[in-house]
Amino acid sequence: MLIFSVFKTLTDQTVTVELKNDLSITGVLKSVDQFLNIRLDNIKVADEARHPHMMAVKNCFIRGSVVRYVQLPAEHVDTQLLEDATRRGTRKHCILARVT
Amino acid sequence: MSSLQGYVDRRVLLVLQDGRAIVGVLSGFDQKSNIVLADSKERVYSLDEGVEEIPLGLYLVKGEMICLVGELDEEVDKSVDLASIRAEPLPPIRYG
């Protein structure tokens, strides 16, 4: 849920999505859903000479389950906030684990 | 749903987990991203010859098989001479 929120704050930013079939697609993040499916606009495929398959594709929907990495624009991510939020999450789990 | 809604009745390119590329008109989808493609054709890429289009007709593709759905810019797509394109097929999904 946390990562979903992070992605939501990044809408309209340019990101690069690397898929599990080694395709790398750069585009403007238009939307994201709870499965981390991603909609990209204005896309560009890395190494277009090798992958001309998407020449006529301008925007796409990427299924969350096939995403390997998403490269985020560092200047638009509040790393401190993210760090705090993720640690808060783990601490809660640790406490729960100790109680049970 | 990050929604395929905008793609309904548009010509789309579907990339599947096994690396196949299918073009067709997206006539429907559901919350599991199962997709119904009308008038679909598979585009077979190879390094030895141009792109071969194999007519498939009406196809229902299971959501878990889908890797990517791209909206085709019809103008650009028509201007591309498929017979002159030599490219290796897209690799299948590899986990890990």
Image (cartoon, coloured by chain):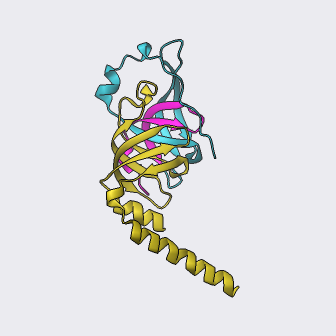
Stretch in magenta: B1-29
Q: Residue at x 40, y 35 (%)?
A: A45
Among the chains, which one is yellow? Answer: A
In the image: residue B56, left or right of residue A60: right
Residue that appears at 41% across and 31% down: A54
Q: In which quarter of the image is residue A42?
A: top left
Outermost residue toward the right in this view:
A100
Q: Quadrant of residue B71?
A: top left
Where does residue A75 sit, x and y in percent of width and height? Answer: 32, 58
Give B80 or B23, whichever is nearer the viewer: B80
Q: In this view, does B68 lie above or below A72?
A: above
- Left/right placement of residue B70 relative to residue A65 reads left
Apparent colour of chain B: cyan
Picture residue at 54% right of the left edge, 18% below the top: B46
Q: In which quarter of the image is the C terminus of chain A?
A: bottom right
Residue with the most extreme bottom position: A99
Residue at the extreme front of the image, as rendered:
A80
Residue A19 inside the magenta-drawn segment? no
Residue B15 on the magenta segment: yes
Front-lying residue, A75 or B3: A75
Instruction: Residue A63 in the image: state x and y as whole percent.
Output: 50, 48
Give the percent coordinates (x, y) of residue B27: 43, 41
In this figure, what is the number of numbered marks? Answer: 0
Taking depth in this image into account, of A21 and A39 the one nearest to the observer is A21
Q: Nearer the viewer, residue A82 or B30?
A: A82
Tell me residue B85's x, y (percent).
Answer: 43, 17
Q: Which residue is drawn at 67% across and 81% down?
A: A97
